[in-house]
Amino acid sequence: MSKDRMISFPDPAAVIDIMRETAEAVILPRFKSLESGDIQEKTGPEDLVTIADIESERRMTPILRDLLPGSSVVGEEAVAADPAVLDNLTADAPAWIIDPVDGTRNFTKGNSKFCVMVGLVHKRQPVLGFILDPLGERCAFAVRGEGAWMCGYDGKEERLSVLAPRPSSKMRGALNFRFLPSPLKEEMKERAETEVGDHFRFGCAGHEYLSLLTGEAHFAMHPKNMPWDHVAGSLMHQEAGGFHARFNKRPYYPDQLDGGLLMAPDEASWDDLREKLWP
């Protein structure tokens, strides 16, 4: 990684250390060990929060803020308690974005598809992004303008790149229809069965982004743009050579919570997928 950046942000290794220490201290000890009182509903039975989410965000918030003096923090659980915290996304100061446990429902079920995500936004642009897979002992990260990398717990780093484009019928990817309105949802599901190749859903945006970065998938679609789900991954995807945009093909900004996101290997394949999936 280049040490000379136009803007001085923290060393990625320092952020990865914070995420690893947090996962080892408060997340992994609770994996497959949650008690009934450790899980709560937020907006409903599909929207859960655990003691691991709460404690990991609480632990990382002051440490990240101290790592970059003058920065703010936008955590998923902090926003759940006070939506005004989202205003930090459009402030002049850099803002850390924390998803303390992405894939919380998987985590509560003992499913290994969960991760920790941290991003840094400055002037509405993602500039740093991290996805920690603690069970896989790996962390993907990206620095704006410098590429995307996978760092193993053994210290080895590998540069990441997206798969080469293919016709949509031969691509594999993640499709999330959950927040689409009817009848659009049903129509898109039907088109997906005939117009695109194999598709899946992990229930964890972070692992779906990892699949784009490690040669397991060509594309991903998400109807909802919560910043903690997409700031880190969208930057990595871009730095790995991919193309992404909102469903109307306008650029993605972290403060825009609607409009969806579609990821593809390049712009031409994005156009192809957009045409094939939407009625």
Image: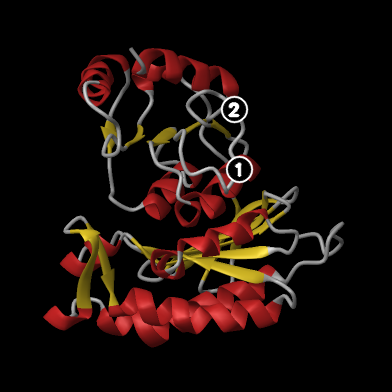
Q: Secondary structure at mark 1?
A: loop
Residue sitting farthest toward the bottom: 25
Q: CA distance from mark 1 to mark 2?
A: 9 Å
Residue 46 found in image quarter: bottom left
Residue sitting farthest toward the left: 36
Q: Are marks 1 and 2 in contact (CB under 8 Å)?
A: no
* Residue closer to the observer: 272 or 90: 90
Is residue 214 placed above or below 111 in the rendered structure?
A: above
Q: Where residue 234 sits: x, y (%)?
A: 55, 45
Q: What colouring does the structure picture have?
A: secondary structure
Task: Left or right? Give the position of 275 relative to 126.
Answer: left
Give the residue drawn at x 28%, y 34%: 177
Q: Is residue 32 visible?
A: yes
Q: Where residue 211 sits: x, y (%)?
A: 41, 46
Is residue 20 placed above or below 158 in the rendered structure?
A: below
Query: Which amino acid lies under the numbered mark 1 shown in the image of this protein?
Result: Tyr
Residue 253 found in image quarter: top right
Q: Secondary structure at mark 2?
A: loop
Task: Left or right? Give the position of 164 relative to 201.
Answer: right
Residue 188 found in image quarter: top left
Q: Quadrant of the N terminus?
A: bottom right
Label 1 neighbour load within 10 Å: few <14, some 14-19, many 20+:
many
Q: Where residue 60 sits: x, y (%)?
A: 52, 79
Is residue 92 placed above or below 77 in the rendered structure?
A: above
Query: Which numbered tag is attached to residue 253?
Result: 1
> In this figure, which residue is indicated by the disc labeled 2?
250
Q: Quadrant of the C terminus?
A: top left
Label 2 neighbour load within 10 Å: few <14, some 14-19, many 20+:
few
Give the residue drawn at x 70%, y 58%: 91
Q: Is residue 35 visible?
A: no
Query: Which amino acid lies under the numbered mark 2 shown in the image of this protein?
Result: Arg
